Image: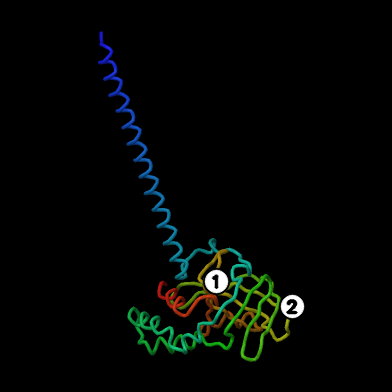
């Protein structure tokens, strides 16, 4: 028959063993959860990168509203002309097949526009040019999927004018490397009066970033991609 002190010692050993077992199980479970969670985020990041580069399935494409682009936006064309985007052109030349001068010329064609500012508020859009401001009310007109020469694809989200200034564009089309509802951080915009003709435009893509960003901040954003 065990004495009381011996019984207590055995009990303490059993309790300690049980606690250690539970702690080990908990740590293993937490480690597995963290591991799985990290894999989930890694998979999501890879999927987002693929979409940004233009590789995705049709089933991933979703309709979007003008709210995704709501805000006050500035053209980056003046920044290119002033030389503020020189670090971006230099990085492209380091990684690409063109010289700094060639990349600058390429983006001069791409970014070129006299619409230095655009605002979107609800269904209303305003285009600011040296000759004045054109405003219109726009409704969603669906999306189109374009396939490019190198095999990747892009989605154009299209809006049609339903009111406002007669001289405002009948259509504008967004391309922002996203294919489902999400707030845009920048975008390329195509506008004009011929919906089909705009879809053929792939050399001039005026590009806009939030107007609140400084030139330095825009450079940082561009270098991050």
Q: Residue 53's x, y, as percent?
A: 44, 70
Measuring 49% from the left and 72% from the top, which residue is drawn there? 153
Q: Nearer the viewer, residue 45 or 51?
A: 45
Q: Assign the N terminus to one quadrant of the image.
A: top left
Asked whether the residues under the numbered discs 2 and 1 touch, taking CB atoms below 8 Å apart as contact, a structural biologist would say no
Q: Position of residue 111 (x, y in %)?
A: 51, 84
Give the quarter of the figure containing the C terminus: bottom left
Give the spatial CA distance, label 2 vs label 1.
25 Å
Q: Residue 129 — which label?
A: none
How crowded pointer 1 is (Cα within 10 Å; few <14, some 14-19, many 20+) is rated as: many
| N-terminal label among 2 and 1 | 1
Seen in the picture, residue 130 relative to 68 is either above or below; the reply is: below
Query: Residue at image x 59%, y 82%?
Result: 117
Give SS at disc 1.
Answer: strand
The residue furthest top is 1
**Residue picked out by circle 1:** 155
Depth check: give the residue in front, 27 or 148. Answer: 27
Residue drawn where x is 38% and y is 82% of the image: 87
- Where residue 190 sits: x, y (%)? 58, 81
Residue neighbourhood size for the residue with mark 2, other residues' Cα within 10 Å, grouped as few (<14), some (14–19), many (≥20) = some
Residue nearest the observer in this picture, 64 or 200: 64
In the image: residue 128, left or right of residue 10: right
Q: Which residue is mark 2?
A: 163
Which-is-in-front pick, marks 2 and 1?
A: 2
From the viewer's perspective, tell me whether residue 49 is left or right of residue 187.
left
Q: For the residue labelled by badge 2, is the local secondary structure a helix, a strand or a loop?
A: strand
Count of numbered tags: 2
Measured from the top left, where is residue 66 in percent x and y?
63, 70
């Amino acid at each position: 028959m065990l004495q009381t002190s011996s019984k207590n010692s055995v009990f303490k050993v059993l309790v300690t063993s049980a606690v250690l077992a539970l702690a080990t199980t908990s740590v293993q479970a937490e480690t597995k959860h963290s591991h799985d969670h990290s894999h989930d985020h890694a998979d999501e990041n890879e999927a987002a990168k693929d979409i940004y580069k233009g590789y995705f399935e049709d089933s991933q494409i979703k309709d979007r509203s003008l709210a995704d682009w709501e805000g006050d936006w500035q053209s980056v064309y003046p920044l290119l002309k002033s030389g503020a985007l020189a670090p971006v052109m230099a990085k492209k030349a380091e990684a690409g097949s063109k010289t700094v001068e060639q990349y600058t010329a390429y983006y001069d064609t791409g970014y070129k526009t006299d619409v230095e500012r655009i605002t979107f508020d609800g269904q209303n859009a305003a285009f600011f040019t040296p000759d004045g401001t054109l405003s219109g009310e726009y409704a969603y007109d669906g999306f189109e999927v374009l396939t490019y020469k190198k095999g990747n694809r892009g989605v154009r989200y299209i809006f049609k004018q339903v009111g406002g200034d007669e001289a405002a564009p009948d259509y504008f089309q967004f391309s922002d490397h996203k294919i489902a509802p999400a707030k845009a951080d920048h975008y390329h915009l195509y506008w004009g009066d011929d919906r089909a003709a705009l879809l053929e435009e792939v050399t001039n893509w005026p590009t806009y970033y939030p107007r609140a960003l400084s030139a330095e901040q825009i450079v940082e954003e561009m270098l991050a991609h």
